[in-house]
Amino acid sequence: MTINNRLNGRRIIVFGSATGIGAATVKRLAEEGARVCAADINIEGATKVAQEAGGETFAVHVDISDEASVQKATEEAVSRFGGLDGAHINAADLRVIMEDSDALSIDLSIFDRTIAVNLRGHLLCTRAVLPHLTKSGKGAIVYTSSGSAHGGEPVRPCYAMAKAGVNALMRHVAARWGKEGVTANVLAPGFTVTGEMKKQMEANAEEATKWAQHFMSRTPHTRLGESEDHAAVVALLLSDDGRWINGAIVDVNGGSLM
Ligand code: NAI
């Protein structure tokens, strides 16, 4: 794989960067020359990722469900870099996903917890970064949503509802802030074995294996997605090469949903 230097000097914050897709994205952005702030509730994990990524990458603690915490993390990145050019709003609470059963049986506390991080948290991150991205002239946001938002699944309605909300938020930002030089797009991954998903699979192997087989059976390839597949697309969307992509939901799933 050839990595170019197309993000040279770009100042980017990644919310949700300690494991999985966010961690791979931090590394990919740094490899392409960006200055990256790795923000996560798991500060030990984010610090390790930042160290491995090298360059000017550094880690900050953030809980994206807490407005003050999001503002503080964003200000740390802005003060270290002197501004911001991009944000990958990727964090999600995936611990609730195995309890997210169906609309009739679900405990409403699962709905509240899912929305607080996976949707409201994305709005809080958006509000924190937008005033800085509009000053950049090359501002770009990539949200991580999911194929579940538009794929239709018999399970995990709360997760899907939150992700559908992220898609709507992205389109609003693209429509409202395009004229101020900000692009907004959604990365919609298909099933990918990552940090929390891996733990869930280990804890509930039978259910997780069924889920993985379900996705494999729908993919015209012979493998599941990997975090690096997504990181490459995020890098494109945050670069000048992706400048004419705006308001798009980019399915990255090997064709499991089309
Ligand atoms: P992951 O569990 O490896 O990464 C999620 C990251 O978010 C972790 O570093 C975690 O510490 C962080 N996080 C959780 N709650 C937080 C909070 N309140 N504040 C700040 N950080 C918080 O999972 P993965 O798979 O890499 O997920 C990344 C994104 O991709 C998520 O938005 C997820 O919904 C989405 N996605 C994942 C799929 C998959 O199959 N793995 C499929 C479709 C979408």
Image: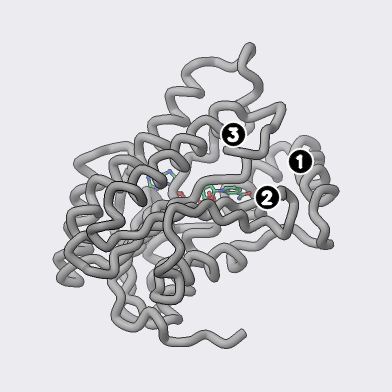
Question: Can you identify the residue that label 3 sits on?
Answer: 97
Disc 2 and disc 3 in contact, CB within 8 angstroms: no
Q: Which mark is residue 191?
A: 2
- How many dots with numbers? 3
Q: Quadrant of residue 222?
A: bottom right
Any atom of ligand 1 within 8 Å of the CB at mark 2? Answer: yes
As shown in the figure, which amino acid type bears the numbered disc 1?
Trp
Disc 3 and disc 1 in contact, CB within 8 angstroms: no
Q: In what element is the residue under mark 1? A: helix
- Which one is in front, 167 or 200? 167
Name the spot of residue 163 as percent of width and height, x first: 51, 38
Please give left or right for residue 107 compared with residue 243 in the image: right
Disc 2 and disc 1 in contact, CB within 8 angstroms: yes
Q: Quadrant of the N terminus?
A: bottom right
Q: Which mark is residue 211?
A: 1
Q: In what element is the residue under mark 3? A: helix
As shown in the figure, which amino acid type bears the numbered disc 3?
Ile
Q: Quadrant of residue 32?
A: bottom left
Q: Marks 2 and 1, how far apart in space?
A: 9 Å
Please give left or right for residue 148 compared with residue 202 in the image: left
Name the spot of residue 211 as percent of width and height, x first: 76, 41
Tell me if mark 3 has few (under 14), some (14-19) or many (20+) residues whose alpha carbon lies within 10 angstroms of its own: some
Counting residues from the start of the chain, the first of labels 2 and 3 encountered is: 3
Q: Marks 3 and 1, how far apart in space?
A: 12 Å
Residue at x 22%, y 63% (from the top left corner): 77
